[in-house]
Amino acid sequence: MEQTALNKDAILLLQGLISTPSLSREEADTAALIYQFLADKGVKVERSGNNVWAKNKYWQAEKGTILLNSHHDTVKPASGWQRDPFHPGLEGDTLYGLGSNDAGGPLVSLIATFLYFYDQKELPFNLLIAATAEEEISGKNGIAALLPDLGAISLGIVGEPTKMEMAIAEKGLLVIDGTAHGKSGHAAREEGENALYKALEDIQWIRTFQFPEVSPLLGAVKTTVTQITAGTQHNVVPDQCQFVIDVRTNEHYSNQEVFAYLQSQVQSELKARSFRLNSSGIPLDHPLIQHGLLLDWPYFGSPTLSDQALMSFPTLKLGPGDSARSHTADEYIRLSEIEEGIAKYISLLSRLKPGEV
């Protein structure tokens, strides 16, 4: 397809996606919309749950495979919306609507890129498109459930709003529930062991401690206590205090390593909700990144999490839009950004040569 037609179809698809509510775990209608869009283009398309995917027409098993992936679920609309979040309001170059920026724009741009290469016979790689669910909640029925069905993958491009700058690394996420234990007693007498005070000692240590290995791209591991709960009434010394730690890890530490060290240094009992969202990325000397550098594209380390964390192969996070608009009221993306995204995706993939994937 010509790129002008691809641009037009991508924008129409995005308008349809905005008009179709797709909160995490409720993406059936947008999955059907994407499935039908690809089928109408003559693509042999597959669906598993609310995940939709397809292979390029001239697939050859001996070639390396590139996965183009983004998500079609959204968060709930923020309270400050002045517009209908499910109406694709277009004002000049600006398209408003929930999920327009995160990650509708990147998703439709990747779908357009897939269609550009779909029926080319001499591609030096195989190409997969996957529009997946539950990214916003790191759910188990999204890309994590689909990856085993996709076979061996050599490289992934994850569509998220990065202003088409190359996010070659992203921080991991570790959420920890802490419980400090004490003994209850009457607050008026010298009785009991105050679990709240024990928790505060641990929280103060967490606040001031820094892991020594700092990443040039991602910075330091960041530990932040974000919630705390204790006590039943004013005159009872609390025997338990619960708190939550949000940890953003860099590539120097696995989530398990960070957890083990924190537990060794605090008196509270710690429990990790999951270890699976580790830091991820792609080496700077990877051919894909080198081609991007030749195009004078900047690169950076991303502090935000994506489905990239669930992929065991090299991945680049890249897409039109701006992460600062994600999850905000009156979310928007510019049509020119989508057109630029499609052109840049195509340009980058077109530079790959046999043996580079």
Image (tube, rainbow, N blue to C red):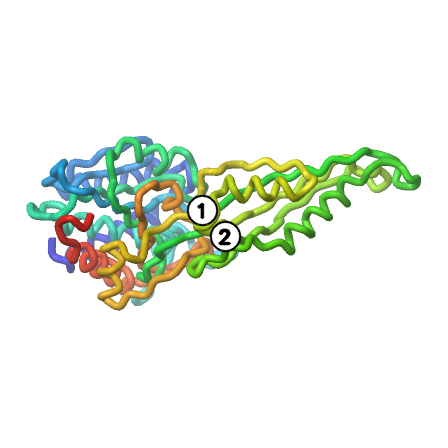
Q: Is residue 85 visible?
A: yes
Q: Residue at x 40, y 44 (%)?
A: 309
- Determine the secondary structure under disc 1: loop
Q: Residue furthest left?
A: 121
Question: Residue 77, position in %: x, y?
Answer: 47, 50
Cβ atoms under marks 2 and 1 closer than 8 Å: yes
Q: Which residue is mark 1?
A: 75
Q: Residue at x 20, y 48 (%)?
A: 357
Q: Residue at x 66, y 36 (%)?
A: 269
- Determine the secondary structure under disc 2: loop
83 or 55, which lies in front? Answer: 55
107 or 200, which lies in front? Answer: 200
Q: Which residue is mark 2?
A: 78
| Amino acid type of the residue tagged 2 in the rendering | Ala
| Amino acid type of the residue tagged 1 in the rendering | Val
Q: CA distance from mark 2 to mark 1?
A: 8 Å
Q: Residues within 10 Å of mark 2 (few under 14, many from 20)?
A: few
Q: Is residue 87 visible?
A: no
Q: Is residue 338 left or right of residue 322?
A: left
Quarter where residue 244 is shown: top right
Q: Is residue 310 above or below residue 109?
A: above
* 2 or 1: mark nearer the eye: 1
Question: Residue 202, position in %: x, y?
Answer: 69, 46
238 or 137, which lies in front? Answer: 238
Q: Residues within 10 Å of mark 1 (few under 14, many from 20)?
A: some
Q: Residue at x 15, y 48 (%)?
A: 355
